Amino acid sequence: MSTNPYSWLDKSLATIHRANWYRSVKAIASRPGAIVELSGKPVINFASNDYLGLAGDQRLIQAAIDATLAYGTGSTGSRLLSGHRELHRELEIAIAALKQTEDALVFSSGYLANIGTVAALVGQKDLIFGDQYNHSSLKKGAILSGAKTIDYEHNNIEDLRHKLEIHRTLYRHCLITTDSVFSMDGDLCPLPELMAIAEEFACMLLVDEAHATGVMGHTGAGCVEYFNCTGKELVQIGTLSKALGSLGGYVAGSASLIDFLRNRAPSWIYTTALSPGDTAAAKEAIKIVKEEYTRREKLWQNIHYLKQELSDLNLLPSESPILCIDLKTPEAALNKAQQLIEAGIFAPAIRPPTVPTSRIRLSLMATHERSHLDLLIENLRLRCAYPYGAQ
Ligand SMILES: *Cc1c(COP(=O)(O)O)cnc(C)c1O
């Protein structure tokens, strides 16, 4: 046996290239914002999750600097050992207040919040039903949990009901999981219907509010608020790294849920606590979400304007700041993204295997000005006003 045991890596990469699935990173050379510097030139940014424009906000930056000066760069350990600071608790109280839940727990990322929570809530005797378009972290959490996992068709309550009728009674606990704003399409889950069916079949329900927190609902609490489900017993998960402009994740819910997770979620127990800087920035962001409702208003004005102006293009259904223009092939999406970049517009092509169909994915910000949107519209019209995927 003289073959190199790593040689399959290059073969596998070649296959990825051939399928046009190859991805690589691009460096942004400026502060986050509506305009960023990419490859040495300014571009209008429709690629970030910084919906409220807070990641480059002076107040978050100052909060992170102050906390770093006071407490250092690293938290030095897990929360249960040396990593806990009063700042973490203050942030958790602020999240619980925004969500109107009894308590909350911050994780080092949204990904870790999802895998740790799912794996803690269900095990081998249990059952998970997940929307087929759920975020990777929910899907990996399901595998990690060891529970029987069944996907239901995207947002299809009848399919979910059918599968519950067949499988539910054969298992102990059952957990239904869904994104609230679907991250690659921008559409919403039917939360009231999911709550009703979860109750009917005695299932726990986990909603991932990663793209909804700060964006959806009257006070920015998310889709739970948007759908008038505030106060209902639910497992709400989210991230501090999208509209909140920082880094980290959270779970919000009942006091017993949070207490249980503090004792049973491995991705919380065995990882280093959030850094003081990230924690303080997220706390400042929640204060701004509460006080500056005009930011959310501006974001929604931008969403309505763009949707209206692009209504004759091939837009996927969306009720969020994520708007996708559907294209036929990965090559068409890559070409479109390249043409946009040449026009000074940064809007990424999203392709399989991340999504089933290729598209240009636009994400809007409160800090986009009308002129930014108009330039985008003009360039999309110029280049997308052909039948589906042409050029
Ligand atoms: C981004 C995202 C996550 C992961 O959050 P991070 O804090 O970036 O790890 C989880 N779920 C959904 C739906 C997301 O979009």
Image: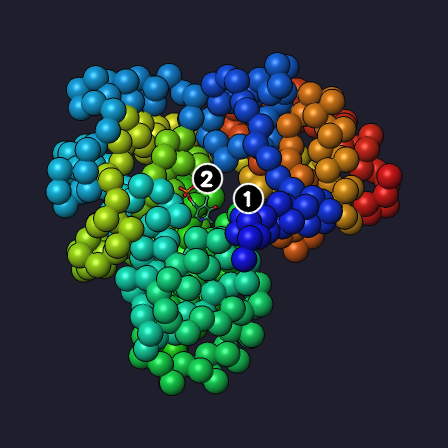
Q: Position of residue 313 (x, y in %)?
A: 77, 42
| Residue 281: image tag | none
- Residue at the image position 21 percent from the left and 17 percent from the top: 69
Q: Is mark 2 within 8 Å of ligand 1?
A: no
Name the quarter where the N terminus is drawn.
Answer: bottom right
Name the quarter where the C terminus is drawn.
Answer: top right
- Residue at the image position 19 percent from the left and 38 percent from the top: 77
Q: Is residue 243 left or right of residue 270?
A: right
Q: Position of residue 343 (x, y in %)?
A: 74, 22
Q: In the rendered view, tell whether residue 330 sits above or below residue 57.
A: below
Residue 115 visible in the snapshot: yes
Q: In the rendered view, tell whether residue 320 sits above or below residue 62.
A: below
**What colour scheme governs how the chains and residues are painted in the rendered image of this protein?**
rainbow
In terms of image quarters, where does ligand 1 lie? top left
Q: Amino acid at mark 2?
A: Val
Q: Position of residue 64 (x, y in %)?
A: 29, 22
Q: Mark 1: few, some, or many residues within 10 Å (few <14, many ≥20)? A: many
Marked residue nearer the N-terminal end (1 or 2): 2
Nearest the camera: 31 or 386? Answer: 31
Mark 2 residue element: loop
Q: Mark 2: few, some, or many residues within 10 Å (few <14, many ≥20)? A: many
Residue located beneath label 1 in the image: 320
Nearest the camera: 101 or 176? Answer: 176
Pointer 1 and pointer 2: residues touching (CB < 8 Å)?
yes
- Residue at the image position 19 percent from the left and 53 percent from the top: 262
Residue located beneath label 2 in the image: 215
- Residue at the image position 50 percent from the left and 35 percent from the top: 49
Residue 311 visible in the snapshot: no
Q: CA distance from mark 1 to mark 2?
A: 8 Å
Mark 1 residue element: loop
Nearest the camera: 177 or 190? Answer: 177
Q: Amino acid at mark 1?
A: Ser
